[in-house]
Every structure is written in structure tokens, then in C-alpha cells.
Image (cartoon, helix red, strand yellow):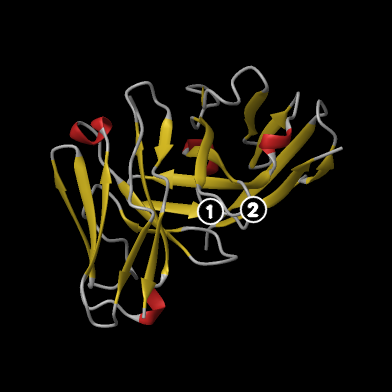
Amino acid sequence: SYELTQPSSVSVSPGQTARITCSGDVLAKKYARWFQQKPGQAPILVLYKDDERPSGIPERISGSSSGTTVTLTISGAQVEDEADYYCYSVADNNLGVFGGGTKLTVL
Amino acid sequence: EVQLVESGGGLVQPGGSLRLSCAASEFPFSNSWMHWVRQAPGKGLVWVSRIGGDGSRISYADSVTGRFSISRDSATNTLYLQMNSLRTDDTAVYYCRYSYDNGDYWGQGTLVTVSS
């Protein structure tokens, strides 16, 4: 199947480490991307190829991969990191797929 | 700076049609993968379709196959999404997206409302 599964919500206090997982069979063979979306805004790319950061993305955001699970980690989460996060990959049949999204609360 | 500007959204009755456009600039449009992604009100992102730089290698999500058609015009740097047989569950903000090896850009979206 080409579904990606994320927790619906994650909550941390400022300064703590937030971890958001994304699981799916396609991730064993394909890279994942992570997008951050704040209310009323278009998504922005925060990670590609599982763990690469585009320019301008803070170093506290990192990624990792193991088997069929990828993880986005925010070390020392800040209030400004509060957003919805989506993982994304492309299946063998060239169909794109997003995870269901995770609402990160920092308070 | 990369710019993607969607247009063409609006209110349409169930069973109707609509064509979305995305005006692209400041990147090599004719060599770039382009996508449409949608987001229903209060819901998550859903991939809809993609098209290769030469207009081939087209893919669609199962939910829109046979009803939607993606195309592009490299002379005007414009991406299109023709949407036919619209249903109420097609109501969403539709985003145009440019993706490449180490980057990803999105437009601000255009709202499509399917309602009687």
C-alpha cells in the first residue's frame, strides 16, 4: 500500500525535543520530504531526502530514517515551530502521497 | 524568486467543470516537474496530479482519475488543471507546486467550492 501514517498531534513545552514519526511501506525504498504549514499559509519544505535541510531552515530541525519510518525532530522547540507537519513521498506507481499531518503544539 | 500564482477557483455546482491555472516564473518551467495538491477545509494535504517537464509522465490520484486532466503550456509558463464532473468532496484549496531535487515551492492556492 502507499499510505503514510503520522500521529495526529504532538505536544511539547518550549525548549523540549519534539519528534514526529511517519510510517509507510514506500519509505523502505523512497525518500521522504517534510512540510511545515502554519494557519492560512501555504506549506514550506523543511526536510528532503529524509534528512537534508533546505537553506534557511534552522539547524534545530533534523530528520532520520529507519526501515519504513522517518522521523522529524525539533531540538529545543520554540513557539514559532507550532504548526502542522506533513510527510510526503512518491510510490513506485509514481503517485504522490502525503501523511495525514501532525499538529505540533508548543506551550 | 520563484513565483506561482493560481487562479480560476470559485463556486460551481455538482457535476460542473472548472479550469485552474498556475502562472509560473523565475525558474526553468519547461524542465520542471509540476504538481497540483489540494486541501479540504480543516483537513490535510492531498496529492492530486503531476506532470513532467515535457508534458508527459502524467499521474493522477485515484480519486480524480477520469475526471481531472493536468496540462502545461511552456510558451506561457502556465500549468493547468481541468476539473470535470465535480463533486462536493472536491471542495478544497488547490495548490500549484514546483518540486525539484533539493527544493519545493508552492503557490498561495485557489479555493474551489462545489455546492448547489
State which mark lies toward you, 2 or 1.
2
Label 2 residue SS:
loop
Coordinates of residue A80 in the picture (x, y in percent): 40, 78
Looking at the picture, does residue B65 appear above or below residue B21?
above
**Chain ID for label 2?**
B
Report which quarter residue A54 is drawn in: bottom left
Residue at the image position 36 percent from the left and 33 percent from the top? A3
Q: CA distance from mark 2 to mark 1?
A: 8 Å
Q: For this view, does A57 lie left or right of residue A59?
A: right
Residue for badge 2: B109
In the displayed structure image, the side of residue B76 where residue A35 appears, left or right: left
Q: How many numbered discs sit on the rendered protein? A: 2
Look at the numbered disc 1 and give the secondary structure of its residue. strand
Q: Chain of mark 1?
A: B
Res. B6 in view: no
Asked whether the beta carbons under mark 2 and mark 1 sit within 8 Å of each other, the answer is: yes
What crowding class fits label 2: few (fewer than 14 Cα within 10 Å), some (14-19), or many (20 or more)?
many
Residue A25: percent from left, percent from top = 24, 30
Q: Quadrant of the C terminus of chain B?
A: top right
Q: Which residue is mark 1?
A: B106
Residue at 65% x, 25% y is: B69
Q: Amino acid at mark 2?
A: Gly
Is B62 drawn above or below residue B8 in the view shown?
Answer: above
Q: Residue furthest left?
A: A66
The spot of residue B84 in percent (x, y) is 75, 25
Q: Residue at x 33, y 24 (%)?
A: A1
Name the amino acid type tagged 1.
Trp
Q: Nearer the viewer, residue B22 or A107?
A: A107
